Amino acid sequence: NGPNLNLLGEREESKYGKTTLDEVEKNCLSHAKKIGIGIEFKQSNIEGEIVTMIQKAKGVFDGIVINAAGYTHTSVAILDALLAVKIPTIEVHITNIHNREDFRKKSLISRAAKGIICGLGVNGYIMALDSMEEILKK
């Protein structure tokens, strides 16, 4: 999870809803346990920390679900890290980035993603976990 997602539930509720990132994490942990996968849930406002998290995932995790938030549209570094680790990746956005400001319609990191879930609210995280489980079964 990228910048400002730590403010979920208190920022722009009309776009992002009232659910906090802590609640998203609890829901994801509970769902992951139900479908039999282990997850680690992280957030940073710092691009380099996100790059480091991605790099450290190599050889440790079988998949990455990422909501890079504002870095989606700007970060070649995050794209390069995702491409370098060669781990199946699903990109998640709470809002429909294609129905927003022009600068948000382009995702740099999509090139590294097996799939994208956007516009379905925080439930997109659960959908991403289900999708990742299916990808990893194959």
Image (cartoon, rainbow, N blue to C red):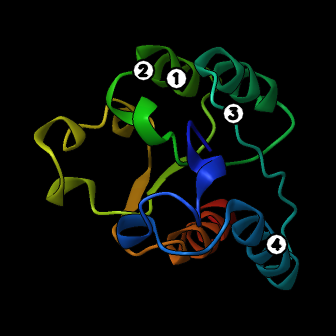
Query: Where does label 4 land, which residue?
Result: 26
Which numbered disc, 4 or 3, marks the residue that appears first in the sequence?
4
Quarter holding the C terminus is bottom right
Q: Residue 30's x, y, as percent?
A: 84, 79
Which numbered disc, 3 or 2, marks the residue that appears first in the sequence?
3
Query: Where does label 3 land, which residue?
Result: 44
Which numbered disc, 4 or 1, marks the residue that appears first in the sequence?
4
Q: Are marks 4 and 2 in contact (CB under 8 Å)?
A: no
Query: Where does label 1 land, which residue?
Result: 78
Task: Sort mark 3 into few (<14), some (14-19) or many (20+) by Cα contacts within 10 Å.
Answer: some
Q: Residue 37's x, y, as percent?
A: 84, 68
Three-letter amino acid code at disc 4? Lys
Three-letter amino acid code at disc 1? Ile
Q: Are marks 1 and 2 in contact (CB under 8 Å)?
A: yes
Q: Secondary structure at mark 3?
A: loop
**Is 62 situated above or below 35?**
above
Mark toward the viewer: 3 or 2: 3
Q: Are marks 4 and 3 in contact (CB under 8 Å)?
A: no
**Residue 39 occupies quadrant:** bottom right
Residue depicted at x 67% and y 69%:
133
Task: Sort mark 2 into few (<14), some (14-19) or many (20+) by Cα contacts within 10 Å.
Answer: some
Task: Sort mark 4 into few (<14), some (14-19) or many (20+) by Cα contacts within 10 Å.
Answer: few
Q: Nearer the viewer, residue 19 or 71?
A: 19
Q: Residue 91's x, y, as percent?
A: 47, 50
Query: Where does label 2 land, which residue?
Result: 75
Q: Residue furthest left?
A: 102
Distance from the alpha carbon under mark 3 to that under mark 1:
13 Å
Image-based side of 98 in relation to 52, left or right:
left
Q: Nearer the viewer, residue 123 or 134?
A: 123
**Residue 105 occupies quadrant:** top left
